[in-house]
Amino acid sequence: AWLVSGTGPVLALCYGFLGAGLFPGVQPVLPAVVGAHFGAALRGWRIAYGAHAGARRAAAAHLIFYAIAAGWTLAAARILLETSLHASADPLRQAAVLYALSLIPPALICILLAPACSRMLTRLLWPKEKTPEESHLDESLVAYPEKAIYAALRELHRIAGICAQSMRLNGDVILEHDALKIARIHLNELIVDEVKRAMRDFLALLTHRRLSRRQAVLIQHIDRCMVDLERMGDHITAVCDISAKRLHIPAAIVDEKTFETLYRLYLAARRVIEEVVISLDPNQSEFQQMARKILEARDNYMQASIAAKSEFTEKIARRQFPPLAGIYLNEYVSSFDRLVKHAKSIALAEQQPQFWIKRRKLGKPAAETAPEAPPPRVDPHDFLDRLQTEDYL
C-alpha cells in the first residue's frame, strides 16, 4: 500500500498509528518511509507519462531524487533508527526525525549533482514533439491594462487549444484503449485547472489598476470564459474516462450503426470546440462574428444530439442492445451536451459589445487605484427575518 501513495498520506497514517498505539515504536515507520519514497517517484513519472520532454525530465529528476532517498534510507537504516530514538522520547517526534534524516542527505547530493543531472536528462529525454506554447500571463504587463487583457485573451486561446487537443485524442480513445493518449488527456486537465487559478490571480491584480469601463467589463467576460474552458476540460476528461471503462465491458459494446451515430455526435461536439479556439484568437478583431459561428456549430450539434437520443431510446426499447450499453451512451451524450453548453456561454460572452481589443491603447500605462473602504457588511439577522415573509420569497 505504501507504494501507491505519496509521502504525505503515508506519514499521516504512520502518525495516526503511532498516536493510537498500533505501532510498538518507530521501527515500523522505516519500511513505510522507504515504500513511500518509491511510491512518490513512480507517481510523478505516471503523471508525466505521455507529456512533453520538459515534464518528463522533471518527472525523471523527481524519480532519481526519491530513488536515492529510498536507497539511502535502506543503507543507513540502523543509523537513522538509532538517531531518531536518541532525538526524542516521543514516538511522533522520532518518526518526524526519521523522515527528515531520510531526505536531507539525498537533497544535498542532488543539489551538488544538479548541473550534471540536468545535462544528462536533456540528452536522454529529447523532445518527441514541438515544444508547447508557454503561458502568456506575465505580471509585468499589469501596469498596461490593455496589454494585460490582450495577454489574457492569448492565454484563453492557448487553453482552448489544449482542450481541442484532448478532444481530438478522445476520438482515438473512444475507438480503442490507448494508455498514452489517456495520460495526455488527464495531464491536459491538470494544466487547464492550474491556468484557471493563475488567470484568476492575474485578473485580480489587474483590478487594482485604473481601468476604463470597457476594460472593467471585459475582464469579467474573460474570467467567465476561463471558467467555461475549465469546465469543458472536465467534461472532455469525463468522455475519456467513459471510454476507458466501456471498452472493457462486453455488455457496453454496441453495433456498428449505433456506434456510427455516437461518433458523428462526437465529431459535431469537436467541431464546436474548434470554433471556440478560432474565436478566441486575439489577433482577429471579429469576435462577434466568430461567436456566431460557434452558435451555428452548436445548433448543428443540438440537432444531432436530439436525433441520437431518440435513436438510442428506440433501440433500447426494442432490446437491440443491453441496457448497460444504453447507460454508457447516455453518459457520452450528457458529457457532449454539457461541453457544448459551456461553448455557447463563451460565444455569448464574445457577442457582448465590450469584447474587443483597443490596439492603440496596448502601450498605455495605468496608475494603481487607491484602496476604497468596503461598504458595511449586511446584517444577517435582517435577511433571515426577510426569509420568513412571503413577500420576500
Image (cartoon, rainbow, N blue to C red):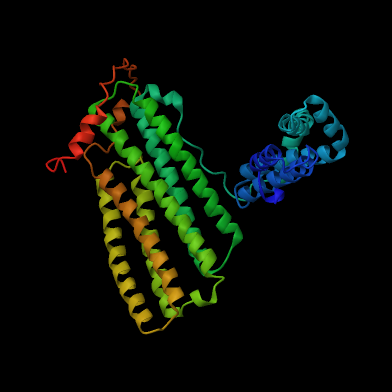
Residue 95 screen position, x and y as percent: 74, 34
Q: Viewer-proximal residue, 25 or 203?
A: 25
Q: How many marks?
A: 0
Image quarter in which the C terminus is found = top left
Give the residue furthest to the top. 370
Residue at figure coordinates x 30%, y 59% from the top left: 298
Specify the quadrant of the image occupied by residue 267: bottom left
User: Can you see residue 91?
Assistant: yes
Q: Is residue 368 left or right of residue 134?
A: left
Residue 254 screen position, x and y as percent: 46, 77
Q: Viewer-proximal residue, 357 or 35?
A: 35
Q: Viewer-proximal residue, 57 or 323?
A: 323
Residue at figure coordinates x 86%, y 31% from the top left: 82
Residue at figure coordinates x 87%, y 39% from the top left: 75
User: Can you see residue 281?
Assistant: no
Residue at figure coordinates x 28%, y 37% from the top left: 356
Give the residue furthest to the left. 391
Residue 261 to residue 58: above or below: below
Residue 216 screen position, x and y as percent: 27, 29
Residue 53 to residue 268: above or below: above
Residue 38 screen position, x and y as percent: 74, 46
Specify the quadrant of the image occupied by residue 27: top right
Q: Is residue 69 left or right of residue 56?
A: right
Q: Viewer-proximal residue, 293 or 317?
A: 317
